[in-house]
Amino acid sequence: MTMTRTEARHSGLPVALLMAALILVAAVSAFFVWFRAISIPHCGPRCDFTTLHWTPIVFAMFAAIVVIAAMVLSWAFSSRRRVWWIPVGGIVVTLAGAQIAHVVSDRALLF
């Protein structure tokens, strides 16, 4: 079901706020995944340094792709009434990816 131009304009604020929340969640999650890599003193020379190096980089690219995809999909489906689920889904996917990245970092840190 499509909306009029006025209805679409009024429904854009919640989507914009959710998109801002997605960007914030992606940035904070990327920071915490990167910050996890400085736990190296825990395991010393036994750590998997290659994994610790690449995990934050791969997650940051993943989070950027999720944000861009959510923006494109929100724009593409902006004439629909229920577009809010796209940024909410992006937040959920980003948090799930951050959890996976933390598990990978824990394995590299020998936790």
Image: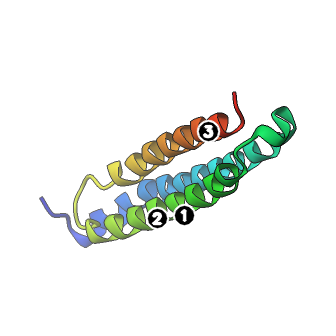
Image point 47% across, 47% down: which residue?
91
Between 97 and 69, the one lying in front of the other is 97
Q: Residue under circle 1? A: 61
Q: Residue furthest front?
A: 46
Name the residue beneath numbered marker 2.
65
Q: Position of residue 59 (x, y in %)?
A: 57, 55
Q: Nearer the viewer, residue 103 or 70?
A: 103
Q: Amino acid at mark 3?
A: His
Q: CA distance from mark 2 to mark 1?
A: 6 Å
Q: Which quadrant: the C terminus? A: top right
Residue 90 is left or right of residue 35, and the answer is left
Disc number placed over residue 102 in the picture, else none: 3
Residue at horizontal 48%, vertical 52%?
18
Give residue 23's quadrant in the image: bottom right
Amino acid at circle 1? Met
Q: Is residue 55 left or right of residue 65?
A: right
Labelled pair 2, 1 in contact (Cβ < 8 Å): yes
Amino acid under label 2? Ile
Vertical order, 69 against 26 (above or below): below
Determine crowd level at label 1: few under 14, some 14-19, many 20+ residues with C-alpha closer than 10 A.
few
The label shown at residue 31 is none
Residue 66 sits above or below residue 106 on the image: below
